[in-house]
Image (cartoon, rainbow, N blue to C red):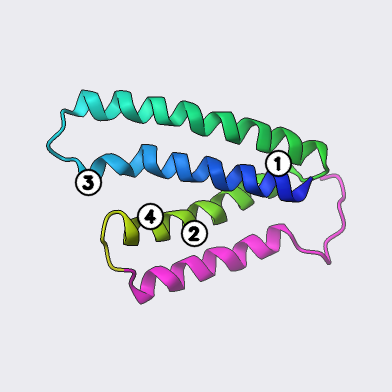
Amino acid sequence: MFLPTLLLLVASNVFMTIAWYGHLKHKDSPLWAAIVVSWLIAFVEYCFQVPANRLGHQAGISAAQLKTMQEVITLCVFAVFSVVYLNEPFRWNYLAGFVLIALGAMLVFAPWQQASPM
């Protein structure tokens, strides 16, 4: 169930990124319209996010691991979105920060760490 969870999380994050940041390209639209459209898009995001978490957790992926996967996917989706859709440059320090976050994510998925109750 890892692959379906991963694909659902990617789809979820695409919609989440559009909902949260897509309106930045349309600054002339009223704020209330941006909020309503963002909420409608976020509904679609939840239609992917909830099944992803349910399937992943049922398959043995911990909640902390699911959240970590979601955050890493979010950074990847956002990096592409900001460059392609918002036409913002991708700077070296963004990459360095993302790499550090990815290294932190590796700790959450540490294969040398055995599951034990706290």
Looking at the image, is mark 2 or mark 3 earlier in the sequence? 3
Looking at the image, is mark 1 or mark 3 earlier in the sequence? 3
Quickly name the residue at label 4: 81
Give the alpha-carbon distance from disc 2 to disc 3, as whole Å: 20 Å
Q: Nearer the viewer, mark 2 or mark 1?
A: 2
Viewer-nearest residue: 109 or 73 = 73
- Label 2: how many Cα within 10 Å (few below 14, some 14–19, many 20+): some
Residue 31's place in the image compared with 112, above or below, is above
Query: Picture coordinates of residue 49 (x, y %)?
Result: 59, 35
Give the alpha-carbon distance from disc 2 to disc 4, as whole Å: 9 Å
| Circle on res. 63 | 1
Give the alpha-carbon distance from disc 1 to disc 3, as whole Å: 34 Å
Query: Where is the N terminus found, in terms of image quarters?
Result: top right
- Label 4: how many Cα within 10 Å (few below 14, some 14–19, many 20+): some
Q: Amino acid at mark 1?
A: Ala
| Circle on res. 25 | 3
Give the alpha-carbon distance from disc 3 to disc 4, as whole Å: 12 Å
Give the alpha-carbon distance from disc 2 to disc 1, as whole Å: 20 Å
The residue positioned 32% from the left and 44% from the top of the image is: 21
CB atoms of marks 3 and 4 within 8 Å: no
Q: Amino acid at mark 2?
A: Cys
The residue positioned 45% from the left and 68% from the top of the image is: 97
Q: Amino acid at mark 3?
A: Lys
Query: Where is the C terminus found, in terms of image quarters?
Result: top right
The residue positioned 45% from the left and 73% from the top of the image is: 96
Quickly name the residue at label 2: 76
Q: Secondary structure at mark 2?
A: helix
Give the magenta range: 90-118
